[in-house]
Amino acid sequence: MSEKPKVAFYWCAACGGCDEAVVDLAEGILDVVAAVDIVLWPVAMDFKKADIEARPDKSILVSFINGSIRSSEQVEWVRLLRKKSQLVISFGTCAGGGGIPALANEFSREEILKYVYETCPSNVNESKVRPGPTPVAHNGDGSALTLPELHEQVRSLDQVVAVDYYLPGCPPTPKIIAAAVGALLSGKMPPPGTVLSPDKALCDECRRKDSKPADLSLAEFKRPHQMHIDPEKCLLAQGLLCMGGSTRSGCEALCPEGNMPCTGCFGPTSRVRDKGAKVVSAILSNIAADEPEAIDKILDTFPDPVGTLYRYGFSKAMLRRKQDD
Amino acid sequence: MADNTGNGQKTNGLPRIGFYICHCGSNIAGIIDVVAVAKFAETLPGVVVSREYKYMCSDPGQELIAQDIKEHKLERIVVASCSPNLHEETFRKAAQKGGLNPFYFQMVNIREHASWVHENKAAATLKAKDLCRAAIYRVRLHKALEKRRVPVNPDVLVVGGGIAGIHAALTLANAGKKVTLVEREATIGGHMAMFDKTFPTLDCAACILTPKMSAVKSHPNITLWTYSEVEKVDGYVGSYEVTVKRKPRYIKEDLCVGCMECIEACVFKEAKVPDAFNQGLSKRRPIYIDFPQATPKVVVIDPATCINVKTGKCKKTCVEACDRDAIDFTQKEEKVQLKVGTIVLATGFKPFDPKKSPHYGYGKYPGVFTALEIERLVNASGPTSGEVLTRDGRHPKAVGIIHCVGSRDEKTNKWCSRVCCMYSLKLAHLIKEHSGAEVYNFYIDMRAPGKAYEEFYEKLLSEGVHFIRGRVAEVTDWAMTKEEEGKLVLRVEDTLAGFVRRVPVDMVVLATGLVPQSDAGDVRRVFNIGCGKEGFFQERHPKLAPVNTFTDGVFIAGACQAPKDIPDTVAQAGAAAAEALALVDAGFVELEPNTSYVLEEECCGCKNCIPLCPYTAISFDETKKKADINEVLCKGCGVCAAACPSGSIVQNLFEDAEIYSEIEGVLAR
């Protein structure tokens, strides 16, 4: 065995896009592979839990963990990796703030399970079987099935184990991954807890910035499919809910470059504790109406407030989650 | 006094906090168990001294804080007592006396927020504990802040040349300050110059006003700019930069002596233009002077009607007539810059437009007049030389005065205009004196609350003027009897007699109320002050800061703030002048440090904050592409800090961390 540093990749409640992002390093991945030994990467390589359990504590230099945490299995895995790793890097916005899966916190666990296993129109489940840690007799051969327990709440990685660094993004862009890996291998890491992306909002990198007027006076919120989007003009000024002003930069304004508004996947800057509350203050203070009825009329065009404002960070929101009655 | 000091608690690196709870006599201690709160506070991390005391705001109370700071090496102070509005400054000073930065202090209002509003003692005590815990959590994060001083330019701008502006300007000038008085009309004097007599003394308005007008003109400390308007105000208290638009009057002011020969010489042999000063009851020429005592006594050419200004083709007989070469058709509008430290706004009112109450027939029946028209009619230098005549030249035998036109009326304005009852009495007296007509006053209530006002009402009652209590329903020329033919009939329910009357008269006087100037909204935006929903300028506090505004260094006086009579206007003008003087003579203003600032490195330049600042303190630095907050203009309202989407604006004393720790503290039970 070589003496190259050991690196692990793991996924929790995620879509797989973060692993794809590692592959997106393209030829860059060869440099990484040359410099390190990958000891775990479920999406690409065949390692078992026992392999990791067999390793000495702290023997892995860094574990990159993506996805949010919502099952007993995920908790076991991230605790194990924490124990075996010198550094844990939260990889991507689901690990960082709960991501899209955290929008499940808008519903109670019971509501979710009831719908998915019982009331969903495409289901046939007359005996109302629900999978879980309690063994359930399988319909066919009588063998018992268990599944990890689904938690009440979808959590970010740092709500379960200590996290050393964060790579934001849905997924993190090759540029910030490469920069992080480079810093890591050269030993030039910033203070622990740092999000490895500029702590400035995205407007800073957006070439449409100069076309943003000082006074927006928003009279209506529009969604991208409802209009022809001017490819040069500030998207917010066009009535699109662009989150650039409240979102950390580092992606080089990929979405605005692609003529789509920023949805906020890099999360808030370090100075903002609750992104949704912040955007409410920021954007809504710019709507054109003064009278309650007129304000309501404009707000009616604001699509899915929680899903829009907390799209990637609901686990970190002060709103927390819905509880069972 | 229970002595809970020196509990020996280790602060584990937290700042050492002194906590004090005030009994406020029984105001607080009557409901809240102050001893229990003090004992509770003592258990909180960082608290090394916790005391309760009868009156923390007393000298011994303040001394206690100063002593403890020295003795116990306190680094933070929390006082739980009344509203910060009352004593925050007191306790900050006490902390400072003890050698601490005054902003290492937090006040908890357990009187207005707890003891005064609750009856349940146990619950109120619990709430007080929560509030105190919040302050103790928060104060740990406080930072040392410094008050900044900015110098005050001693020059003053007075806007509006009515009696309020005149009085304020003279007061300031007499105190040795340089004053610029800007008036948009061609003469100062305002509405008071149009009045014939003043109530209740029946002093001749001109006799008491014109000496003050000449004093303004001749005062070495006053620069008088008539026919001028303030267009733009930049800067902040102590250092305002004002742009004044000076309209061309086509007359060289320094050469004209007001001989008026040019007026006689005008090619218009006949005066054809309605004379605004006389409310359109007489005509003037395109070159004119408002009234004989106009100040400055300089004629003015009306560009809308002067043939030469309009077409350039006129014999210019006026120019020939002027032996001083004072007429100058080449004059152009000028923009003049002015630097002042303080501003007094005295832009006055406008009379209610009676056409908005069409049932009184103004503009429909020639016999219906406004009160201001009657002022001109009874005036010796007015259009009829003081004779009370209807528009068709008849001597009225009966005159009805309708009170509360455009006042106390759900359909128009709800407010009482305060002066109409009294001026109606005055006009009743003058009409009777000048014409011998029977005069009927139709009133809702007689409001005579000023000095010698009720006595004036008594006098009128004894003069044989008729008083009918009731709001007039309509004025009509529809006669029901022979006596009513050719007359104007006032239909009114006499609420004292209990039946509906029809009173035929020859002349109707509408006691129109006072409303804000039509452009009051624009004016208040120029000066960045607020207004109430009716449009009058908003004072900072209705009782305790009646001439201050929410913009430091801008004061208001007279009817621009609310309807008021001459004595109140003059008193307010004096007060506004005194407030301006207080700033000027202090020489500097101290700025509260609870201002916001932009984290320059972090600001992404999204401009979100810029339109939101109610004090226009934020500008966009085009070279740096960053927002910039002018600390002197910032009032610490926090709007920008809340609205900055990337959290790159911080407000001193209200940093996010401080607010969150306060919330955590209040919820930590």
Image (spheres, coloured by chain):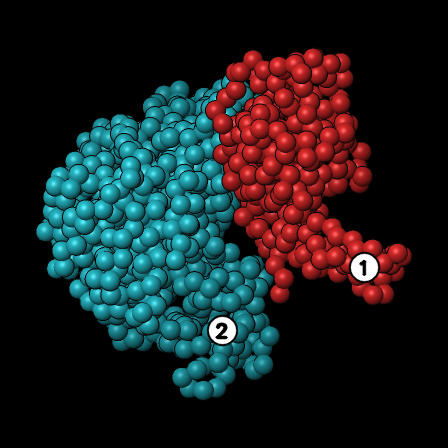
Chain colours: A red, B cyan
Kindly identify the amino acid type of the residue bearing the numbered disc 2: Val
Where is residue A23? Give x, y as percent.
Answer: 76, 23
Q: Between residues B410 and A26, which one lies in front from this camera angle? A: A26
**Which residue carries the number 1 mark?**
A137
Where is residue B563? Give x, y as percent.
Answer: 38, 56
In the rendered view, would you say B598 is above or below B411? Answer: above
Q: Between residues B27 and A91, which one lies in front from this camera angle? A: A91
Kindly identify the amino acid type of the residue bearing the numbered disc 1: Ala
Where is residue B440? Give x, y as percent.
Answer: 40, 73
Mark pair 1, 2: CA separation: 91 Å
Where is residue B596? Give x, y as percent.
Answer: 41, 34
Q: Between residues B156 and B136, which one lies in front from this camera angle? A: B136
Task: Give the residue drawn at x 63%, y 62%.
Answer: A324
Q: Is residue B192 left or right of residue A234?
A: left
**Which residue carries the number 2 mark?**
B472
Task: Count how many numbered circles sit on residues in the image.
Answer: 2
Q: Secondary structure at mark 1?
A: strand
